[in-house]
Image (cartoon, grey):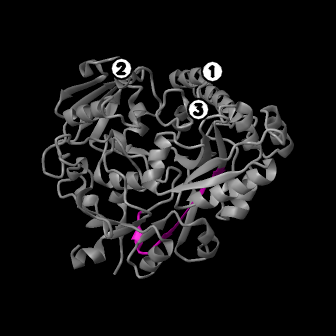
Amino acid sequence: MPAEASHTFLKVHIQSEPLTLDPAQATGIREFQILQALFEGLTRYDPQTLKILPGVAEKWEISADGLRYHFFLRKDAKWSDGKPVTAADFFNSWERLLNPKTNSPYAFQLFDVKGGEAYAKGLLKDPAKLGMKVLSPTEFAVTLERPVPYFLSLTPFSALAPVRKEAKEIYAISNGPFHFQSKDPKEGILLEKNPFYWGKENVRLPGIQFRPFGDFATALKFYGRTGIDIMADLPPQQVPILKFRYDYRSGPVFRTEYFVINCKKPPFDRTEVRQALAFAMQRDVMANRVLQRGDLPYGFFVPPGLVGYKSPAEPQTFNLAKAKELFQKAGFGKTQPFPLFKIHAKNEGDGKLVAEAASQMWQKNLGIPSQLFVEDWGHFIKTRNNRQFDLSWGGWVGDYLDPNTFLELWTSDNRQNHAGWSNPKYDELIHKAQAEQNREERFRFFREAEQILIQEAPIIPVLVPTKNYLIQPYVKGYYPNLLDIHPLRDVYSLRP
């Protein structure tokens, strides 16, 4: 990297290299923050309020019945090689996301497009029959199966961004405020300002460097020497010390951290076993004694903060007597020992710490043995996707402010349903909620579905985390918000 770039580029800490920079395949936060800088969808988020703003589409029209969207693309929207971004680019990218050959974990984001789910499942073969039409180079029309109140909140998501399929590497040609410059195992990912971006006058950063440091102590030294400008995902054990610093920031996020249970694997296919584990989880101990970073102990899956949505009546709570009763009902106890199982976690952030604490809780409360199964990010994702685990620790950040972004994960055929759990009544309630336009009724269906999820316990919600990070005081335009989305097109540095 040139010497002048090392001084003026914004330097963002990431815990490891991204697994992919293909918008159709990325699933992790570190990937998303890079992709948000490289690509821009039809719409984008206001960095403070999360209000939907024009992106590649300068305006749009919505039919009275809420089924048809007519997007008008900017004539000055261009790729990083100077070619115009067209409606055909969006059609091709959305078709690619849905195409079964792509096998995208986020194909479900377009299932509400007419024919989208059938196409993704191979039931519809002709992409011309999808509810997506190129009306002109700058006009893109979308028809939905049903009105979707949050549809415009989906279109900023990186999976729905346009890509140039002919590029040797998908990320090599981009349409966002920055374009790819280089990648190095030590220096990380280097992005430069895109000279062809339609809003380049508003982009004040010459570039961004995403620096990978798995070791926090080393990263903190670089931060102290202003070799890093933003450090997020602080280790829990460091938060009680760092929270008194002038450059420490924290805020709530729309995220739940939880254990997902492999419901396809005995004895975890037994509801009583899963319930026993859930009732034996001491969430307050996990949040207040183990992590000590200001997290909220939480026995639901949809996080708090959604206006108008009330959680179900019965959360998962610590109830040792109930846990033991269910455990015995499942046939386990002194005469029938529980088999040794593994707790799966990634070897960064709170993963190992939480897994160790959970193992001790279940040993103490139920007398059942477990082992830690800790992996780096790449292997962790592969193990999770292939369902090669007993219990796995992770989290989910909402993609938009609606219960659907959490609860649709556990429908029977969702590719993010790593539990392998299936409940027809749950599926029915989610589909009813997705089709319902009355907000109160929608939320009632979601609440009933969430109660089923909590009772059958394919997951064990544990806490709603607090976002903790260090940020140099000269960095401006980086705002806390529930979705933990920070468009770097709006960030700038006043570093002297």
Q: Can see residue 399? A: no
Q: If the image is split into quadrants, where does the N terminus sit? A: bottom left
> Looking at the picture, how far across and down is residue 205, in whole percent?
29, 66
Residue at the spot of label 1: 425
Give the mark toward the camera: 1 or 3.
3
How far apart marks 1 and 3 lie (CA) works out to 19 Å
Q: Which numbered marker is on residue 115?
A: 2
Helix, strand or loop for disc 2:
loop
Displayed quadrant of residue 273:
top right
The amino acid type of the residue labelled 2 equals Gly
Looking at the image, the residue that sits furthest to the front is: 335
Which residue shows up at 74% across the image and 42% down it? 338
How far apart marks 2 and 3 lie (CA) works out to 30 Å
Residue at the spot of label 3: 264
Q: Which span is picked out in magenta?
A: 463-477
Against 155, residue 463 (above or below) is below
- Mark 1 or mark 3, earlier in chain: 3
> Looking at the picture, how far across and down is residue 467, in whole percent?
55, 59
- Mark 2 or mark 3, earlier in chain: 2
- Mark 2, Cα crowd under 10 Å, few <14 / some 14-19 / many 20+, is many
Helix, strand or loop for disc 3:
loop
Tell whether label 3 touches label 2 (CB within 8 Å): no
